[in-house]
Amino acid sequence: MNQIKEVIDVKKASCREMYMPDLMELLHSDFRKYVCWGARNFLVDKKQPTMFRMLVSGNLHKGYVYIFLNGMDLFDVYLTTTQGTIKDRTDEMGLYFDQLVDWIDDKIERLPNYVY
């Protein structure tokens, strides 16, 4: 697993293929949060979709969000600068699908005084 302050190595982080329509549906499941991220500049390897990258512009993080599916069918997420230096990441275990959107929102957008 890539470590904080390293430049992300996509090949090292990649493990399993993801079905992108399902991932996009999951990211859009709480559309209010997704819109607040300012997500754009999406990148997916169409031949072997093992990585999804989006550029975000949230209150807490401005840079890239990388999403991978690990060998346990859990998500590994990395927050990087626009140059690829890792600023934050999920722990070794990964995230379940129902934790993904909230984890990303907590790291890039959510401020303590938010009310939903």
Image (cartoon, rainbow, N blue to C red):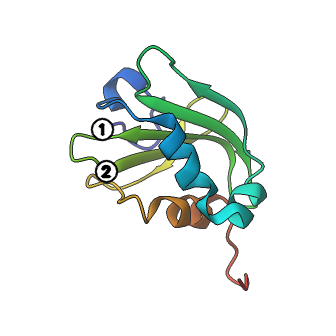
In this rendering, the answer to whether 29 lies above or below 65 is: below
Front-lying residue, 61 or 51:
51
Task: Name the kind of residue labelled 1 in the image.
Answer: Met
Tell me what residue is drawn at x 57 percent, y 34 percent.
53
* Location of residue 64 (image quadrant): top right
Left or right placement of residue 90 versus residue 41 in this view = left
Q: Reply above or below: 30 against 66.
A: below
3D distance between C-alphas at marks 2 and 1? 14 Å
Task: Please name the residue that numbered disc 2 is placed on.
Answer: 74
Image coordinates of residue 71 in percent, x first then y, are 22, 40
Q: Quadrant of residue 56?
A: top right
Residue 86, x across and y down, in percent: 51, 40
Q: Are there few (<14), some (14-19), or many (20+) residues within 10 Å of tag 2?
A: some
Q: Which residue is mark 1?
A: 1
Give the quadrant of the N terminus. Answer: top left
Residue found at x 67% / y 81%: 112
Please tell me whether residue 23 is drawn above or below residue 43 in the rendered image: below
Query: For the residue labelled by badge 2, is the local secondary structure a helix, a strand or a loop?
Result: loop
Q: Give the residue at x 69% y 64%.
A: 33
Q: Amino acid at mark 2?
A: Leu
